Image (tube, rainbow, N blue to C red):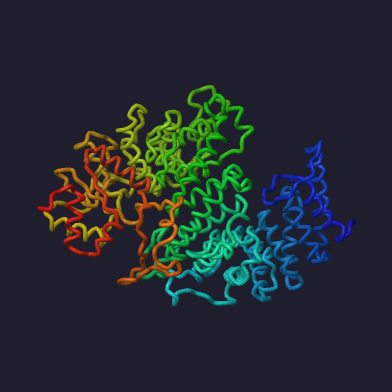
């Protein structure tokens, strides 16, 4: 028998010096290179099998540090295939449960990091480890220990009991903070308190791991995100000497940092209605502005974009980013409605460089073996980001087309096309495809080799029997409502802009195709499968009502929320989408006889352009002021209006379609209307000017 004192250092030694048995990306060690790497891997694997078998029956004789070292060595090497692997980690977990008070902070936190890396998820063990940071004084834990622990908790997927305990959007009386009732919530609370108390002690990776862990675990904590942003980039008037900056973050760190902030804005939607009460739902950008202020979030993302494209920064340039890091960062910018043109231009150029071996389907066969592959979600998020921000580059989607066709094809097939629903579903999820096809329409970019694949992925051959086949292939319940709406928009655009592709929707669409639809036949009078006559959920804003009243005063005949259905498209415009009559297009204010429409564009229609723009980065108000208001139980935000806003992709696509249909569409930005200060004469003159009418 090898003693425990010898076994655990051996595991650590292997972990530090040799390449992984099965590749593990959760480390940054430089392994010793080998001339016989396959033989060395097999030798290490056999050795670890022997170590696991030998250690499992006598783990009670290992010290906490030895148990930690043993777990870390296996996690570092990615050795998950030993016959005794599960038994070994179950045994280490049991020892932690029995002796957790004997474990030093480093042993607890690193062991939990190892558990999460090898996907050993025993809820009882995780709760016991989390409780230690509260039972002991969190101040005795080092930053790396704290970040390792919360990272492990977030990765495990073990949810906190009180995810809204720190959410300032939830009324204080309904925030459940009961110390001692849930160790996971308490652990995150302690970690955030320490990060805010001593941020200088946290390395960049440790800092971003805590923020990432909060967002990953579904915990909104506006205070720690605001304090961290202030610490990293400062506020208006802050001296550069008093801010930390972003230069110390790795490419992955920058991507995770951006993702964490964007996810915080998204998480507001997860709060139950019973907690929100009459406060109302906020948009993602509106939420993050309320959390940390509009000026500060703009400053943070402007600095982040500048950091990545800084020519003197060779370590963090976009060329160093992995596909996931590129995708996460772009997704974060787009989700928050922020465009850094320099960054997105750099991403476009980098994608072209990486995809250059795939210029055609024939050249792609050999290139795929020598290129860092883009996963389906990474491609979907990337093109969705460009489309959402309405940032058009020359044929970005065309650059991906040969690669996507190759990844979705059966390479042994002798038929054309070499793809079908089965081969496509091995690479894509259905919602990812819906995002890409929508992006094609927004960017007005319809690659001829890609579009038929996307339609096959979403609709098969368009026959009724394909509905079941698609559900089985994707293991889902059908198309989400968002995807159905996207397809109606896309098909309308294709009928006008790319009829040569010959693509169409099934005649009975979306009956049967919609998520959770019943497979039984139903009458057309009810549109079947629970689909109603309208795909729209419309509300009329106070701003729109004010505009309507002003238009009435100047004698402009109109109606609000004018709807256009698929039936209207066929009867009036000669465009046949499907046999069902569905309302899917709306115009805020319309004179149907003259086909004049007015779109009252609120904040959700705009993005902020961050490049070299102090107006976009700093609002005119004091940056520390939380410029929010609560009226009639509604919580809102006064957005800054400046010349650095431009309409987003969804707004552009809708405008383009309506223009194709012969409508003259005028846009009324919320910030221009707000500048009128409510004066009736000013409002009337503005409306006259907008419509190009004389004021007589």
Q: Is residue 463 left or right of residue 115?
A: left
The residue lying toward the viewer, choosing from 87 and 596, is: 596
Q: Is residue 596 left or right of residue 315?
A: left
The residue lying toward the viewer, choosing from 134 and 612, is: 612
The percent position of residue 69, horizontal first and vertical second, equals: 78, 59
The percent position of residue 234, horizontal first and vertical second, equals: 52, 64
The percent position of residue 134, horizontal first and vertical second, equals: 64, 74
Residue farthest to the right?
1
Residue at position x 35%, y 70% in the image: 629
Asked whether residue 571 appears in the rendered view, the answer is yes
Q: Is residue 135 left or right of residue 670?
A: right
Considering only vertical position in the picture, is 443 above or below 109? above
Quadrant where the N terminus sits is bottom right
Residue at position x 23%, y 36% in the image: 570
The percent position of residue 60, horizontal first and vertical second, equals: 81, 66
Please identify the quarter of the rendering in which residue 208 is found: bottom right
């Amino acid at each position: 028998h090898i003693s425990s004192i010898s076994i655990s250092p051996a595991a650590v030694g292997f972990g530090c010096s040799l390449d992984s048995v099965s590749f593990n990306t959760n480390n940054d060690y430089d392994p010793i290179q080998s001339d016989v790497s396959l033989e060395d891997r097999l030798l290490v694997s056999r050795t670890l099998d022997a170590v696991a078998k030998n250690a499992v029956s006598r783990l009670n004789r290992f010290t906490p540090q030895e148990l930690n070292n043993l777990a870390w060595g296996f996690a570092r090497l990615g050795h998950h295939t030993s016959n005794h692997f599960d038994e070994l980690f179950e045994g280490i977990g049991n020892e932690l449960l029995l002796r957790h008070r004997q474990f030093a902070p480093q042993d607890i936190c690193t062991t939990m990091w190892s558990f999460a890396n090898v996907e050993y998820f025993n809820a009882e063990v995780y709760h016991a480890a989390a409780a230690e940071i509260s039972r002991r004084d969190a101040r005795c834990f080092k930053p790396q220990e704290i970040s390792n622990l919360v990272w492990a908790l977030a990765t495990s997927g073990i949810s906190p009991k009180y995810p809204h305990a720190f959410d300032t959007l939830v009324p204080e009386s309904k925030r459940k903070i009961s110390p001692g009732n849930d160790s996971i919530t308490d652990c995150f609370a302690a970690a955030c308190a320490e990060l805010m108390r001593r941020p200088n002690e946290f390395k960049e990776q440790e800092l971003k791991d805590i923020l990432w862990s909060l967002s990953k675990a579904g915990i909104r904590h506006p205070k720690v995100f605001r304090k961290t942003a202030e610490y990293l980039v400062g506020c208006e008037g802050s001296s550069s000497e008093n801010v930390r900056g972003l230069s110390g973050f790795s490419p992955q760190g920058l991507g995770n940092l951006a993702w964490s902030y964007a996810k915080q804005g998204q998480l507001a939607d997860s709060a139950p209605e019973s907690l929100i009460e009459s406060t109302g739902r906020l948009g993602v950008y509106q939420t993050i502005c309320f959390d940390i202020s509009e000026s500060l979030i703009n400053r943070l993302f402007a600095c982040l974009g500048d950091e990545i494209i800084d020519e003197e920064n060779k370590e963090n340039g976009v060329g160093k980013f992995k596909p996931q890091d590129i995708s996460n960062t772009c997704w974060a910018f787009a989700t928050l409605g922020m465009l850094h043109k320099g960054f997105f231009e750099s991403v476009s150029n980098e994608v072209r460089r990486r995809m250059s071996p795939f210029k055609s389907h024939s050249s792609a066969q050999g290139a795929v073996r020598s290129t860092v592959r883009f996963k389906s979600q990474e491609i979907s998020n990337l093109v969705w980001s460009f489309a959402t921000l309405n940032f058009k580059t020359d044929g970005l989607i065309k650059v991906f087309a040969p690669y996507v066709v190759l990844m979705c094809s059966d390479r042994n097939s002798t038929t054309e096309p070499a793809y079908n629903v089965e081969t496509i579903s091995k690479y894509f999820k259905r919602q990812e495809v819906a995002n890409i096809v929508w992006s094609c329409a927004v960017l007005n970019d319809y690659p001829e080799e890609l579009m038929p694949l996307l339609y096959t992925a979403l609709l098969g051959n368009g026959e009724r029997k394909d509905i079941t086949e698609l559900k089985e292939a994707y293991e889902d319940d059908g198309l989400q409502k968002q995807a159905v709406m996207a397809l109606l928009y896309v098909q309308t655009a294709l009928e006008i802009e790319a009829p040569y592709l010959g693509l169409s929707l099934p005649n009975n669409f979306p009956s049967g195709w919609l998520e959770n639809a019943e497979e039984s036949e139903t009458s057309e009078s009810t549109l079947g499968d629970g689909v109603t006559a309208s795909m729209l959920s419309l509300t009329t804003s106070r701003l729109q009502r004010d505009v309507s009243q002003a238009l009435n005063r100047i004698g402009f005949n109109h109606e609000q929320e004018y709807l256009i259905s698929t039936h209207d498209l066929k009867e009036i415009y000669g465009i046949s989408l499907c046999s069902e009559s569905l309302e899917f297009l709306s115009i805020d204010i319309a004179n149907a006889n003259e086909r004049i429409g007015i779109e009252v564009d609120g904040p959700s229609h705009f993005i902020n352009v961050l490049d070299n723009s102090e107006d976009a980065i700093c609002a005119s108000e004091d940056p520390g002021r939380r410029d929010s208001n609560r009226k009639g139980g509604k919580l809102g935000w006064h957005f800054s209006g400046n010349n650095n806003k431009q309409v987003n992709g969804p707004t552009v696509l809708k405008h383009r379609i309506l223009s194709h249909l012969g409508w003259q569409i005028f846009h009324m930005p919320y910030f221009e209307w707000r500048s009128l200060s409510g004066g009736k004469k000013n409002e009337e003159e503005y409306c006259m000017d907008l419509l190009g009418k004389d004021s007589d």
